[in-house]
Amino acid sequence: RFPLQTNRKVPVRVQSMISYKGQYMPYSDVAVRPDSILVYGDEEVIGRINEVETGTIKVKGAAGTVTGVIGLIPVEGIRFSQDEVFYTQEVGRYVEQSIKIPVKISDLPAYANVAIVPQEVELRFRQPFGSVGKYDISDFQVSVDYNSILIKDVVRPAITKMPDGILSVDMEPAFVEIVL
């Protein structure tokens, strides 16, 4: 008797330890090609495989796009359609800016009397080095939904408007207090 053999397509999960040179950051996640492979083996074993992992991609002080080929971690009793994948991560230089933005309340009824403490938050954002100049208050919008403040008196504002090309953004403080 021979066990039933089958195959199945499963995603490839990337394992990485990448550090970046000062003033450099990832512009994208690590991507692999192909992003899924076929696994072959006994039907019972294949049924338990939900993904395959790459070896750990280790890069220190990246100052430009990272590319390479990495092997897949073997699984006993399973064959892969290929043993390695190509990986890439776009990395580039950035500049950091900050701007103070007033917090608005969306869907505020005319009869409501609501105060936000503090009334503005500071956004620290990164943009690619050499990209279009400075942004101003009109390029961003931070707000809390009136319906959410009826449930809680401390809420996290949402960034509801932001220019394209911003790589990352942090808000300080992360929460505001609502006074009804």
Image: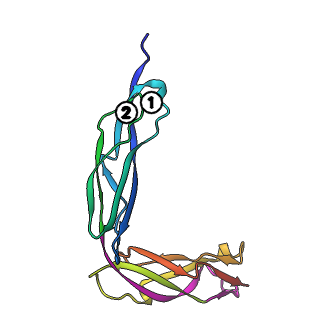
State the image coordinates of residue 138 (x, y, percent, origin top left): 43, 88
Question: In the rendered image, which residue does mark 2 sit on?
Answer: 39
**Quarter of the image holding residue 21?**
bottom left
Q: Residue at x 35, y 57 (%)?
A: 58
Provide residue 163's location: percent of width, then percent of height: 38, 78
Q: Which residue is painted at 37% across and 61% down in the image?
A: 29
Local packing at callout 2 (Cα closer than 10 Å; few below 14, some 14-19, many 20+) is many
Q: Which residue is mark 1?
A: 46
Where residue 71 appears, x then y in whole percent? 32, 44
Q: Main secondary structure of the magenta part?
A: strand
Q: Is residue 109 magenta?
A: yes
Using the rendered view, name the quadrant where residue 78 is placed: top left
Left or right, residue 24 beside residue 144? left
Most foreground residue, 142 or 75: 75
Q: Position of residue 89 (x, y in %)?
A: 31, 61
Proximity of marks 1 and 2: CB atoms separated by less than 8 Å:
yes
Observer-nearest residue: 114 or 38? 38
Task: Please report the residue visible at 35 percent of the width from the left and 64 percent of the height from the top.
Answer: 28
Colouring rule applied to residues: rainbow
Name which of mark 1 and mark 2 comes first in the sequence: 2
Residue type highlighted by circle 2: Val
Instruction: Left or right? Give the position of 51 relative to 67.
Output: right
Residue 147 sits inside the magenta stretch = no
The boundaries of the magenta stretch are: 92-118
Residue drawn where x is 35% and y is 77% of the image: 22
Front position in the image: 149 or 117: 117
